[in-house]
Image (tube, grey):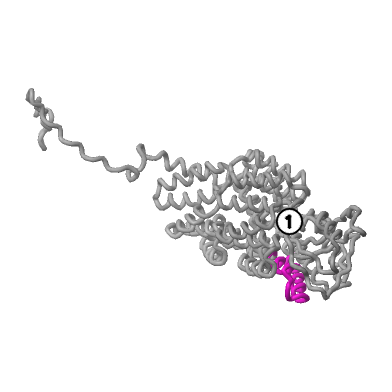
Amino acid sequence: MEIETGSESVTQKEQRPPPEPAPAPASGSGSTAASTSAVWSESPRGARRSPSLRRVLAASVAGCVVLGGVVVVLRPDAGGKAAPPALGPAGRAMAAAGAGVPAALPDLTVLIGEREAHLKKHPGDDQSWAVLGAAYVERGLRTADSAYYPRAEDALRTSLKTRPEGNAQALTGMAALANARHDFRGAKKWAQKAVAQAPKRWSTYPVLIDAYSGLGDAKGVGKALDTLKELNSGTSVMARAGQVYRDRGWREDAASKLMDAAALAEGSAEKAACLYRVGELAWERGEPKEALRYDDAALRSDPDHHPSLAGKGRALAALGRTSEALRSYQSALVRQPAPEYALALGELYESLRLTPAARAQYDVLRARVKQEGVNGVNDERILGLFEADHGDADEAVDRLRAEFKRHGSPEAADALGWALHRAGEDEEALKYATRATDKGPRIAAFSYHRGEIERDLERYGAARRHIGEALLLNPYFSPLLAPKAREALDSLGDPPEGGPAEMYAAKPPEPPTPPPTTSRPTPKPTAPRSGTSTSQQS
């Protein structure tokens, strides 16, 4: 069986069983955005390799690289002495995938075209089906085009049908697809199957970390990250660790890891993903100028990195550069019509009192959620948040109760708590809001939501603390809610002088003063009796 890769091809013996997978080398690895499907490497099936040939494979990006859980073999030069040939677009995409970093969109497009053409001639090639399925997942994520997901599922299931046993590549591709659809239970199931088959394949663990994060399983995230760091220490692992630290609220550790990953990133798409994450941290710290600087740098590295366009929009809005912010959001939506971008742009319009424009964006959001639902994407959390603030709060509660039952993450807890508050159920709302702030990342919106719930419950001290914390974390966290947070804090006023009484121990009673022995005390004037005026006493 021959697998073609650009100008390269290699003949494989179909009947030979695959060897044990080995962890990818640390050098040359890069970071990747948390929302992007993970990749991993595996030794190819085929003829026995000579020592010199194995050295060439280890030294170059050729050998075996995997995109979204699939194996692709690149042919080394004859004799193993000359430098490997320059990679074409498909080879670059697979080399990036083998290093655990995002591929450039044009290269990914070429790879998809090549695999589709190859599979028309070789429909029994399970590895190429897995490559194609993983590439579809990546393409869908990078363009917010969920129409790729059913095609990805068909390709990955074909790979599993063609090779039912020992196909950890396709299993991990299915896990990445489930994460992309926000089906974190399904992602956990597929990823655990892949780990059981190949526990040393390092690139399976980022997919498992995403699944655990979506389920709110902090212990699972920690164990998977520890295993990942034992198997690989490249820049992609640095970036993944930075995201985990951010979710834990370890902002300084997260910034350190993500900045290191950004500095060491090599490919343009990889560097853009890292720079965007650093900018996101700056935004969450309430530093829009710094966030804008990183978003601009990310777009210079990769103009196709659409999350940076949306990040640039929110930073520009915080800096008062409203016209530029609107253009940036509009550009992001044209290139990547994600529902969360439509919500952000709609709320920016609403803050500017441009109600018709805001409603138009909310209609875009509903349409996108409906279309993504047809393709298997679960957008219940973003739709529930939208309904809580701009639609039917009771409907939002129903949606978010079901979502929290499926995926008990801090993000789902915050959304459910806020919807319950908007529906007037503050006692129950506080339980979920507390869970979000205690177990989730340090997000200004989480603190504000909790503070508003506490204010309605007349817990004014706690409300003052959490609303103040929201504005301290990021004074610009929302064009609609940040002004309301400032108004709420002003209405609460300053705390009582001396602090809450329950914070201090009661003063012991003073001992009685003994009467003086040298002279009689001067009698004190007595207060007037009841019913007697002061003038009568005089």
Question: Which region shows up in magenta?
Answer: 147-176
Secondary-structure class at tag 1: loop
Residue 110 placed where, x, y %?
A: 85, 59
| Label tally | 1
The quarter holding residue 61 reads bottom right
Query: Is 370 left, or right, of 460 in this rendering?
Result: right
Can residue 56 be seen in the rendering of this structure? Answer: yes
Residue 83 placed where, x, y %?
A: 89, 52
The quarter holding residue 131 reads bottom right
Image quarter (top left, top right, bottom left or bottom right) of the C terminus? top left
Q: Amino acid at mark 1?
A: Gly
Q: Residue furthest top?
A: 518
Residue closest to the eye, 79 or 292: 79
Name the residue: 54% across, 54% down.
440
Query: Is 451 left, or right, of 42 in this rendering?
Result: left
Name the residue: 10% across, 30% down.
515
Q: Is residue 227 above or below residue 174?
A: above
The quarter holding residue 320 reads top right
